Each structure stands twice: as structure tokens, then as C-alpha cells.
Amino acid sequence: MTSFIVASPHACIGCRTCEVACALEHVTAGAEFNPRLRVMRLDSLSVPVMCHQCENAPCVEACPCGALAMGSARVEADASRCIGCQSCVVACPFGAITIETRIGQAPVIVKCDLCGERERGPACVDVCPTAALTKMTEQHLTELQRQRNIATAALLNL
């Protein structure tokens, strides 16, 4: 099972702290400001949108050169294989992937990688001032299901 980040639109205040933390975590020499998530604002709420790390990821299926692949806990990107065709961008139902291209440079795949190299986990989750972001793992989902089953059973016993 993949891990992924869940965003609560009710807790998000639209401060974009998660975007800044993400961009800073992924900055390289000469790189642009490229957060792997975007805060979307609607009339009455805002919420960060990022890769859902789909288990049957359409972006992986759409990539003709294997630049995207299923890892053990996430959809992994290998920019060295990317040809910049944008097939993954079109296939993603969440609009969570972009391909940055510069003349004379290799394409860069910009998508959430759950800050896989970061010891404390995803930077966006770490810095969110309202705890609107949570990294979900198989253990978290199992516990959530257990809690919901107990709550449902309690309602049925009334």
C-alpha cells in the first residue's frame, strides 16, 4: 500500500506555509520556486492539492519511457528518463504533476515525493500551523477503520 497525504479543507487557512516548506525542501542550485503541492482557494475554503500516490496510478501507465514508477510507498519519479512529453500531466486526475522544461536542460518532474529523503517525513505536514495535513500510512488507515467500526457498532446497539 502506498502512503499519501490527506488535507483537511476545514482546518486549512490558506497560509501557503506548506508550499514554501515544500519548495525549500526541494531547492537545488539554480532551481525555480517549485513546490510539489499547490494551495487551491475557493470562496469559503482552501486546501492543498498534491499527488495522491495512487496504487493504480494513471500517470505511471501514461509515461512512455518509465520516468514514473510504483515504489513501495509512493509513485517515484526518475527525471533522467523523462522526455518532457507531458503524458503524465494529462493523465493525472488531480492535476498534481508538472514538467518543468528549460532550453538546454533536461525536463524536471515536479510531483510530491513525500519528502522521502527527509528523516522527519514530509515538510508540509511538519510545518502546517493548523495540522491540516496528515501523512496516512497503512497503520493509520487500519486504526481509522477500527475506530469507525466501533462507532458504527455503538450506533447499532442503541
Image (cartoon, grey):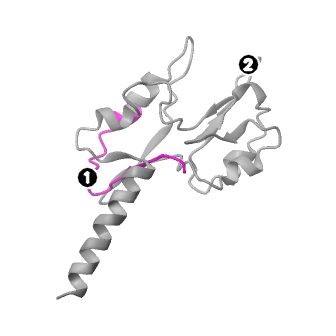
Q: Mark 2 packing: few (<14 Cα in 10 Å), some, or many (20+)?
A: few
| Residue in view at x 40 percent, y 57 percent | 141
Residue marked by disc 2: 105
| Residue in view at x 63 percent, y 36 percent | 76
Residue type beneath disc 2: Gln
What is the number of the mark on residue 131? none
Q: Is residue 3 left or right of residue 56?
A: left
Residue 107 seen in the figure: no
Q: Is residue 12 magenta?
A: yes
State which region is magenta: 1-20
Estimate the spatial distance between the alpha carbons at disc 1 and disc 2, rounded to whole Å.
39 Å
Q: Mark 1 packing: few (<14 Cα in 10 Å), some, or many (20+)?
A: some
Q: Which of these two is toward me, 53 or 107?
A: 53
Residue marked by disc 1: 11
Residue type beneath disc 1: Ala
Q: Which residue of the protein is positioned furthest toward the left in this rendering?
A: 158
Q: Position of residue 45 (x, y in %)?
A: 31, 57
Q: Position of residue 93 (x, y in %)?
A: 61, 57
Residue at disc 2, secondary structure: loop
